[in-house]
Structures are given as structure tokens and as C-alpha cells.
Amino acid sequence: MNPTLRRLLAPSRLWLLAAVLAVGIIVVAALVAPSAAPAKAVDNPLVYANGEPVPNGRWSALCIDGVAYLEIVSPHGHAVVPKRRGNGLVERCAPPEGE
């Protein structure tokens, strides 16, 4: 075997440091990652722009055929509109597991 290759593959402090660093990155990523529980997306209170609640108003997020929709119910009516991204495209979604 080539002596240079043998020296590179031999255990050293650098390999131990790299392994500890990799484990540390994985632990930090697991702690920083958002929780697996999704936010409540059904019957949320509807509020005005100033934060005041709309009487008898609510909104829900829906996923129909892979497209995200917002259902808005207020005293003035009911609407189901496609959810849009910041660039104007329709937001895609995946139905919750088990459906």
C-alpha cells in the first residue's frame, strides 16, 4: 500500500475532531429544526389589519388536489381562494398523512 495513503487512513486526532464536529452539527440541527407538529390550520380567528377580531369570522387552510386554498368565513360572506406565493404563483401542498 502507498505510504501516503496509509498515513491518510491511519487514525489520528483530526479524524476524531471531524467525527465530534459532525455529531455536534447533527445535534444542533435536531434542536433547531421546527417541531413536527403542524400549526392549527382550521377555524382560526379572523382579524382586521389592526388586530381587532372580526365578529363571527374565521379562516382555514385547505389542500384540494395538491393546491393550497384559504377558506374565509365572515359575517359578510364566505370565500374559498387559492393561496398565492410571494411571486404570484399558486401555492402547492400535500394532504396530511392518513388522508
Image: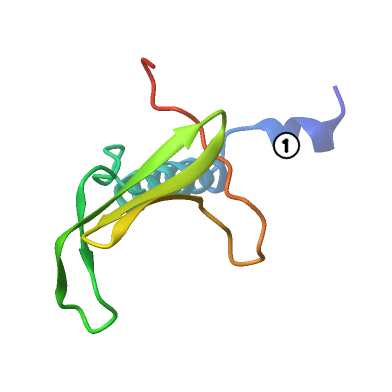
Front-lying residue, 93 or 30 = 93
Secondary structure beneath label 1: helix
Position of residue 19 relative to residue 74, above or below, is above
Query: What is the quadrant of the N terminus in the image?
Result: top right
Give amino acid for label 1. Arg
- Could you tell me which residue is drawn at 72 percent across and 37 percent down? 7
Q: Residues within 10 Å of mark 1 (few under 14, many from 20)?
A: few
Where on the picture, by quarter, is residue 55? Answer: bottom left
Say whether residue 17 is left or right of residue 75: right
- Could you tell me which residue is drawn at 39 percent across and 27 percent down? 96
Pinpoint residue 62: horizontal percent, then vertical percent. 40, 39
Counting every numbered tag in the picture gives 1
Say whether residue 92 is left or right of residue 53: right
- Could you tell me which residue is drawn at 39 percent across and 21 percent down? 97
Front-lying residue, 3 or 20 = 20
- Could you tell me which residue is drawn at 69 percent across and 32 percent down? 9
Position of residue 47 relative to residue 77, above or below, is below
Pinpoint residue 46: horizontal percent, then vertical percent. 23, 62
Position of residue 37 relative to residue 83, above or below, is above
In the image as oriented, which residue stretches furthest toward the front? 76
Residue behind mark 1: 7
In the image as oriented, which residue stretches furthest toward the top? 98
Pinpoint residue 64: horizontal percent, then vertical percent. 50, 31
